Amino acid sequence: MEKGSLFIAIRGTRHDGHDHIAEAVGAGAAAVAAEPGRCRAPGVPVIESENTRRLCSRLFAAFYAGEDMPEHKTRLVAVTGTNGKTTVAHMIRHILMYAGFRVGLIGTVGTSFGSREYESDYTMTTPPPEEFYRIIWDMIGSGADYIVFEASSHGIAQERLAGLDIVGAELSAAVFTNLTPEHMDYHGGMEDYFSVKCRLFTEYGPRVKIINTADPYGERLYALAGDGAVAVDTAGGGGGVGSVYPSGTVMMGAAGVEYTYVSRDAIFPISCRVPGRYTVYNSIEAAATALSLEVDPVTVRDALGTFCGVRGRMERVRCDTTKFSPHVFIDFAHTPAALSGLLSSLREAEPCGRIVLLFGCGGDRDRTKRAVMGRIAADGADLTIVTSDNSRTERASDIIAEIMKGVPSGAACEVIPDRAEAIEYAIMNATPKDVIVLAGKGHESYEDVGGVKRGFDERKIVAAAVEKRYALYGGI
């Protein structure tokens, strides 16, 4: 706490900032923002607010505002949902950049504007206000035409977006991908989770609302969204007025997907080099968003044809083909729906080989999904390797035991708690036709054990295992 600072007391999930007001004042805070009647420190000015999280966002939005901002208006695009946010956001950015716009991106995999990468001490999908608004104002000052950001349920619930009206940039589009059980430890149930997601569309006034109506929650959201709502039937078939859907035969394989984009305003082919059925879902929503931003269909088509994927999202690990080259994918799938979709996509893309799945579940997170994911893994993979995945302050063995409750007796399953050893085991026992998928960590380059992060890059571990296998067995 710097002397002369304003201390904002925020009620958290584990601690309450109001309990530390006296400590902050003693450390030099010149003023306090607190909920009504909760500041007992005498002799300092007090700003009372019913929602100090909201106040915090608005203060930072005003604090970082520059005096000499460009005259042109920056426009915002927000993407929300349980699965697919990162890929859809990256696709939208790619299309807009292909169209010649200057585009910033704020999201799970990283934050960037042009060639500039923003470093962060946070791993949040939607950064906290002190970082979120600093980055937004910096991008605006650097001449961004668009800023695409991922809006997480935590970010919405914790009022991190509450200062956007102070920024003054239009929220040109908001995208809803899907809603499946996740963060139940925070939200307590699907209805609260859904209501939080709805706020992006009902409170923040996006001009266009791109909604996946093949998802049951998306169908409900579409009914609530009002003007500007665009129904995207990602499952195909169309139906409603103004609906968007993939038509004709959807081609899927290891090289990517192909289908025809259909709406009342445009019909054109889409080919994307990222494999998996979810690529159809993600790309058609990205295309619908870009078209709503007045990007022409030819540019959208050509841009998606050059999109090569996102780090850690159905990412194929390139191995030395002169030695041994198994089909290895890394994906962030860490929810039951994402894992199920990943396995079915791999089965469609690589139907001839054996699917070997390596996964774990994160510690200090929703425990209800662990056994469910164990069952999904056993049903969808030919061999499952259960291992660790950011156990944090829990014991990896306890998490694995909960996962194994969902794995049927007799299922082809190995338990190898050390993730590096598990990856090596998968490579050493692979055949050239096998598809190995490392699920859960995705873009992350660390492992969190006991609350301490250490370097852990699955790509390097795969490469080392391939070298070891080649040294032992040659190119077989």
Image (cartoon, rainbow, N blue to C red):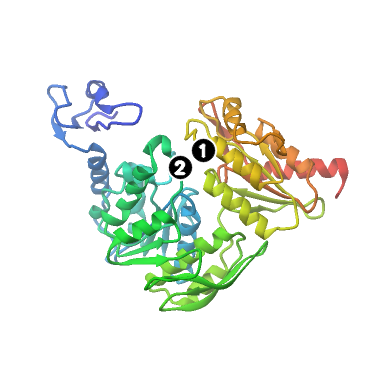
Q: The residue under label 1 is which amino acid type?
A: Lys
Q: Residue placed at 60% from the left, 28% from the top?
A: 401
* Snapshot quadrant of residue 38: top left
Horizontal and vertical percent position of residue 128: 35, 42
Q: Secondary structure at mark 1?
A: helix
Q: Residue 182: which disc?
A: 2
Q: Rounded to the nearest whole Å, what is the CA distance between mark 2 and mark 1?
A: 8 Å
Residue farthest front in this picture: 409
How packed mark 2 is, by other alpha carbons closer than 10 Å (few <14, some 14-19, many 20 or more), is: many
Horizontal and vertical percent position of residue 322: 82, 54
Q: Secondary structure at mark 2?
A: loop
Horizontal and vertical percent position of residue 130: 32, 42
* Snapshot quadrant of residue 100: bottom left
Contact between marks 2 and 1 (CB within 8 A): the answer is yes
Residue 154 sits above or below residue 302 on the image:
above
* Snapshot quadrant of residue 280: bottom right
How packed mark 1 is, by other alpha carbons closer than 10 Å (few <14, some 14-19, many 20 or more), is: many
Q: Is residue 148 something one can see in this rendering?
A: no
Residue 293 sits above or below residue 58 on the image:
below
Q: Residue placed at 41% from the left, 65% from the top?
A: 102
Q: Residue placed at 32% from the left, 52% from the top?
A: 198
Residue 144 sits above or below residue 138 on the image:
below
Q: Is residue 327 left or right of residue 250?
A: right
Q: Is residue 202 something one can see in this rendering?
A: yes
Q: Give the camera-side residue of 9 and 428.
A: 428
| Residue occupied by mark 1 | 369
